[in-house]
């Protein structure tokens, strides 16, 4: 009979477990980083979408009130003239002030550190440059700009 020798292999399973734990931990950290980057990209995309919609909204307001002309050139946040349907009867210039007031209120509500500016260039047809700027956490200030030509009636 041959004597049976037991091999001493104490602690080998513990080393495997620790290596597996390290590998899984690195993988979980990677997943957490990707999740955080995805959230940041989603936030940026949402703000860019809001900026495009807000700039298009102002372009539509200008097209509807084309008689106001240079009154849309914004030097401030506009004035609440209550020019909504059922409100006061307003001149085209007063309607432009009201449009700027409503528009800037929407920008302040939807974009962090948001600001909206309309520039008027007298040409034939007139050119309006609409800029929406906001603050991004990682990128700093971002500006979306469109230029429209609105022919006179």
Image: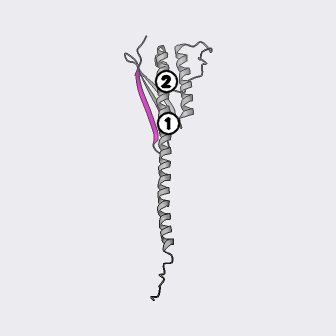
Is 67 inside the magenta-drawn segment?
A: no
Q: Which residues are magenta?
A: 132-149
Q: Nearer the viewer, residue 12 or 97?
A: 12
Q: Mark 2 highlights which residue?
A: 58
Which element type, helix, strand or loop, lies under badge 2? Answer: helix
Q: Residue at x 49, y 56 (%)?
A: 29
First in sequence: mark 2 vs mark 1: 1
Whether 123 is drawn above or below 33: the answer is: above
Is 143 inside the magenta-drawn segment?
A: yes
Q: Mark 1 highlights which residue?
A: 47
Q: Residue at x 48, y 40 (%)?
A: 44
Whether 14 is drawn above or below 29: the answer is: below
- Is 10 on the left-hand or right-hand side of 126? right
Q: Quadrant of the N terminus?
A: bottom left
Residue 122 in view of the camera: yes
The total of numbered circles placed on residues is 2
Q: Nearer the viewer, residue 128 or 111?
A: 111
Q: Residue at x 55, y 29 (%)?
A: 106
Coordinates of residue 102 in the picture (x, y in percent):
56, 25
- Is 151 on the left-hand or right-hand side of 108? left
Q: Label for residue 99?
A: none
- Choose mark 2 or mark 1, whichever is in front: 1
Which element type, helix, strand or loop, lies under badge 1? Answer: helix
Coordinates of residue 36 in the picture (x, y in percent):
50, 48
Coordinates of residue 149 in the picture (x, y in percent):
40, 20
């Amino acid at each position: 009979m041959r004597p049976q020798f037991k091999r001493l292999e104490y602690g080998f399973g513990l080393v495997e477990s620790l290596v597996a734990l390290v590998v899984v931990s690195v993988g979980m950290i990677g997943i957490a980083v990707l999740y955080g980057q995805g959230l940041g990209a989603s936030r940026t995309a949402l703000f860019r979408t809001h900026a495009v919609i807000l700039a298009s909204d102002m372009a539509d307001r200008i097209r509807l009130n084309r008689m106001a002309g240079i009154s849309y050139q914004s030097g401030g946040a506009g004035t609440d003239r209550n020019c909504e349907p059922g409100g006061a009867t307003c001149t085209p210039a007063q309607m432009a002030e009201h449009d700027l007031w409503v528009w800037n209120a929407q920008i302040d509500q939807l974009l962090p550190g948001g600001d909206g500016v309309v520039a008027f260039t007298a040409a034939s047809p007139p050119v309006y440059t609409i800029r929406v700027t906001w603050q991004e956490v990682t990128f700093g200030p971002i500006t979306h700009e469109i230029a429209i030509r609105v022919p006179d009636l």
